[in-house]
Image (cartoon, rainbow, N blue to C red):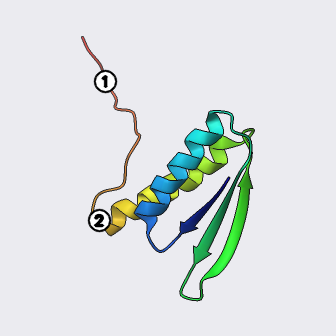
Amino acid sequence: MAAPIDESDPCAAAAALRQVYYSLIAGQGSMIVTFKAGSSGVERSVTYHKAHPDRLLAVIRGFETQCAAVQGKRPRCHALRAGGML
């Protein structure tokens, strides 16, 4: 399966890559993703295999961070808090 991704819209790119990620971890084999970048429309393609879904997840999180910035939201933070219940 090939998924075309437009990097100029990080929100749509993150959503499309999430679907690729879910297919990949469901065992659908390798996934080819084609990126269109910049105003020149240069195309790149990457093949993700089910052995390395963490690499794809890192790309998704990057697009989600860009999407949050475009929408004026704060980036997601995954920090642990100190303290606890007494």
Figure check: 25 above or below 67:
above
Which residue is pictured at 41% across the width and 40% down the height?
78
Mark carried by residue 64: none
Secondary structure under tag 1 reads: loop
On the image, numbered disc 1 is attached to which residue?
Answer: 83
Outermost residue toward the bottom in this view: 40
Residues 82 and 79: in front is 79
Which residue is pictured at 62% across the width and 69% down the height?
35
What type is the residue that disc 2 sits on?
Gln
What type is the residue that disc 1 sits on?
Gly
Outermost residue toward the front in this view: 1
Figure check: 27 above or below 62:
above
Which residue is pictured at 74% across the width and 46% down the height?
30
Q: Quadrant of residue 64?
A: bottom left
Which residue is pictured at 26% across the width and 15% down the height?
85
The 10 Å Cα crowd at callout 2, few under 14, some 14 to 19, many 20 or more, is few
Task: Give the number of the mark in front: 2 or 1.
Answer: 2
Q: Are marks 2 and 1 in contact (CB under 8 Å)?
A: no
Mark carried by residue 71: 2
Quadrant of the drawing holding the C terminus? top left
Q: In this view, does 86 lie to the left or right of 4?
A: left
Figure check: 51 above or below 83:
below
**Horizontal and vertical percent position of residue 75:** 36, 55
Per the model, the C-alpha gap separating discs 2 and 1 is 33 Å
The 10 Å Cα crowd at callout 1, few under 14, some 14 to 19, many 20 or more, is few
Residues 44 and 1: in front is 1
Q: In which quarter of the image is residue 68?
A: bottom left
Residues 84 and 73: in front is 73
